Amino acid sequence: MSEIPYKIYLNEKEMPKAWYNVRADMKNKPAPLLNPQTLKPMTADELEAVFCSELVNQELDNTNAYTEIPAEILDFYKMYRPSPLIRAYFLENELKTPAKIYYKFEGNNTSGSHKLNSAIAQAYYAKKQGLKGVTTETGAGQWGTALSMACGFFGLDCRVYMVKCSYEQKPFRREVMRTYGASVTPSPSDTTQVGRKILAEHPNTSGSLGCAISEAVEAAINTDGYRYVLGSVLNQVMLHQSVIGLESKIALEKYGIKPDIIIGCAGGGSNLGGLIAPFMGEKLRGEADYRFIAVEPASCPSLTRGKFAYDYCDTGMVCPLSKMYTLGAEFMPSANHAGGLRYHGMSPILSQLYHDNLMEAVSADQTSVFEAAVKFARVEGTLPAPESSHAIKAAIDEALKCKETGEAKTILFGLTGTGYFDMYAYQKYNDRQMTDYIPTDAELQESLSRLPKVD
Ligand SMILES: *Cc1c(COP(=O)(O)O)cnc(C)c1O
């Protein structure tokens, strides 16, 4: 019997007890969310019509550096955390690089990604507020899966609007969500006003994330005892995901390791924001220096080719406006297999840090991303998610630069999830049928010209 308490003790020593809020150390704070009608900053009251109260407090809190993780959430975390921090010896060997490569693996839970870290927090606060349930959207399905698990755990109803093409292409994702008790509706649907409007205008549309968000928000506002939850982009999600970076830091410090370069893939920015948070805090306070690199798909390049401006977060324009690097809410990325990286915008926190030159960004085309994924899988074993493989690609590139210069840098990257539901993408790659579509400047200009006029 002595083994169980020992394990709990070990976990507790290696897990943070509080989340870290990088906004507390930012000189230039991220811009506030704006009411889409009045263009004035959203008040807590306005936000509480859509989001859970405690999450609104976290969203608006630019000053407190630490928020204690409630005991119920810590207990849930202990089922799969601390997540593994692994030295990629075999990859180093394969690349013949003097660099040391570490990755923090967030795919070791059934949902298969880091999204569970925030899903369980958001479900907890909804339950604590006495709500009946939550609504959300899901694109590739990872967020919907994570939220279904979290809601199932707390006995909350979970209604997921799933982008229609994913709903049809990923029936097993859908069944995982239903198994955990969620109801899944393909979006656009005729269950909401905004859905019916979009269907009337585009009867053959296969849906988009922006459209599913609009439907989920409308459903939450119109259903008693429900609120809307979102799996990325928001400040509150960055806060919960800081558990990734804090744990990494605890583990690295235990072995006296200091990373030189920290890399993550960036869709809405939550895993990268969480991974770099405590390290960025040190950089902001002038205590240490690191290079941070965001990696995005060349087909949806919000940081590297977007504009830093206020924009809509959804197609139906029911959500608050957010100041971020964006390609325009109407931008439709080409069919890229990294579904989790196809959002037109980026976290306001990461956008501000990038704008202030505290972080770098690169983009990668999907064929070279899958080349990196396959190389990684063959030597390290884990089959990576297409999203995560963007970080692998950049880590390999940095390690190869070290080979040229002979520098033994320490690289840390986030391996956000596994790719078992993405075998159609791997099939395309294995059959040499993968294509890359990179938007032209004219196409980006087209959607950027329709940004809302603010300031
Ligand atoms: C959703 C997702 C991402 C991208 O989301 P971020 O908010 O940018 O972290 C990356 N990897 C996986 C596996 C995902 O599910």
Image (cartoon, rainbow, N blue to C red):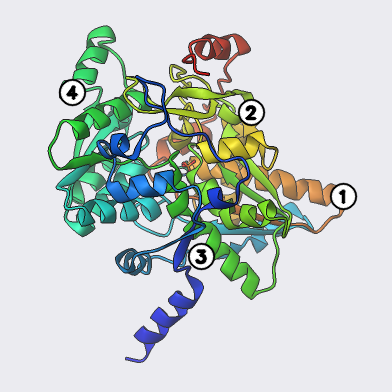
Q: Disc 3 marks which amino acid?
A: Pro
**Amino acid type at image mark 1:** Thr
Closer to the N terminus: mark 4 or mark 3? Answer: 3
Q: Quadrant of residue 209?
A: top left
**Which of the marked residues, 4 or 1, is nearer the chain's N terminus?**
4
> Which residue: 55% across, 53% down?
275
Q: What residue is shown with label 1?
A: 405
Q: Secondary structure at mark 4?
A: loop
Q: Which residue is mark 4?
A: 192
Question: Residue placed at 21% from the left, 53% from the top?
Answer: 129
Of 20 and 83, the residue lying toward us = 20
> Is tag 4's residue or tag 2's residue first in the polypeptide sequence?
4
Q: CA distance from mark 1 to mark 3?
A: 30 Å
Marker disc for residue 80 = none
Whether the residues at callouts 4 and 3 have beta carbons within 8 Å, the answer is no
Q: Secondary structure at mark 3?
A: loop
Q: Nearer the viewer, residue 420 or 388?
A: 388
* Label 1 SS: helix
Residue 304's disc number = 2
